[in-house]
Amino acid sequence: MVTFIGTQEMQTHLKKVSVETAIARLADMIKEDYLRWNQFDKCARVASHSDVGVIELMPISDGTQYSFKYVNGHPKNTQEGLLTVTAFGVLADVDTGYPKLLSELTLTTAIRTAATSVLAAKYMARPNSRSMALIGNGAQSEFQAIAFHCILGIQELRVYDVDPAATDKLIKNLRAYPNLRIIRAGSTAEAVKGADIVTTVTADKTNALILLPDMIGDGVHINGVGGDCPGKTELHADILKNANVVVEYEPQSRIEGELQQMPADFAVTELWQILEGRVAGRHNEKQVTVFDSVGFALEDFSAMRYLEKYVMQKSSPILDLVPELLNPKDLFGMAVDEKSTTISATIATETAVPINA
């Protein structure tokens, strides 16, 4: 029997605790896991690319629990009324190999991405940062804005998107945060000028030049979120050349991040080293810092732990996903005799809460 957490359960949870509380809690759990970096069996995600998008699997294990996330990225989807990114994940027990939890990760991925962004910024942005430019106002933008406002103290948000309707949506959704001053910019350059932090979260699968070197002043922290697959970048390479660059998992970022533009010997620091205090996230007030964030499986592992701790309840739906047999060596018996399954499977089916309840 496998516990299931669907989009409605996650929606109910967020209404109960608030988006900012969920982001803050998850940021703490992500930090906990990054601080035990060497315990994890890690690899770059496995990607299947097409002309219009990508489908990826993101596995990781700490030796006790194993998780993976299925996630896609299809920018054209919004033209058909579909999400650009959808995801689900599994948390399993290493000793038995049995899955324990199957969950939506579409909403949760937006929360964990914002949590990772603000966690890195705590160590990399100037402590007195109060303004942020947010370039790309699509599905993940509100989560980034809320994280930096509520957790890092950003008071002024300059927003820009090539699609004015996306900016309309963002401004409307942030009305619940009256202490956040929102300035609608007419261009990326206008939004970025004078900002302490710049967050880019655009969706197009292209080697774009969203940020140019002459836009970036001394001391700016750049949170590059949108460049997350081969052939997709947002920053001019010269910005990286003159910055302190931090990544999540270097082998993956070399393939998928802004880092794909740079030579193999270009030096970067992994986030866990910053969190552990081995390396400074910022060396002086004038230094430009870049968090080249592509999303890493460890963050989804933390997200699954968050769901298990804060969202999963006794009343959560149960899926009849794995057979429970009276004789575990007699799988064939299940195919020909319904009585070969255990009574517990029948009880679970009868008492399960409907997914759409």
Image: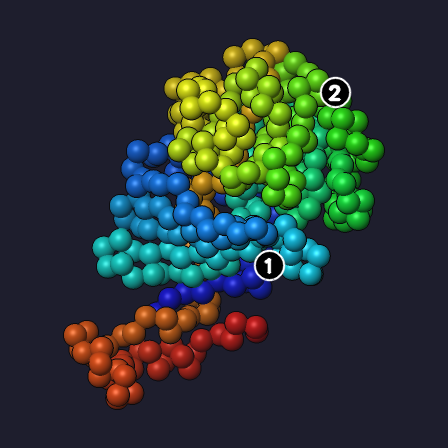
Query: What SS does tag 1 mark?
Result: helix
Find residue 143 and report its horizontal and vertical position in percent. 63, 43
Q: How is the image coloured?
A: rainbow
Residue pointed to by mark 2: 194
Q: Residue at x 69, y 46 (%)?
A: 138
Name the front one of labels 2 and 1: 2
Residue pointed to by mark 1: 11
In the image, what residue type sits under mark 1? Answer: Gln
Which quadrant of the rendered structure holds the N terminus? Answer: bottom left
Earlier in the chain: of badge 2 and badge 1, it is: 1
Find residue 18 and report its horizontal and vertical position in percent. 62, 49
Q: Residue at x 65, y 40 (%)?
A: 202
In the picture, residue 196 is in which quadrant? top right
Find residue 126 and report its horizontal and vertical position in percent. 60, 19
In the image, what residue type sits under mark 2? Answer: Gly
In the picture, residue 178 is in which quadrant? top right
Q: Say above or below: 273 vs 55.
A: above
Cα separation between marks 2 and 1: 36 Å
Q: Is residue 335 visible?
A: yes
Tell whether 193 sits left or right of 93: right
Q: Residues within 10 Å of mark 2 (few under 14, many from 20)?
A: some
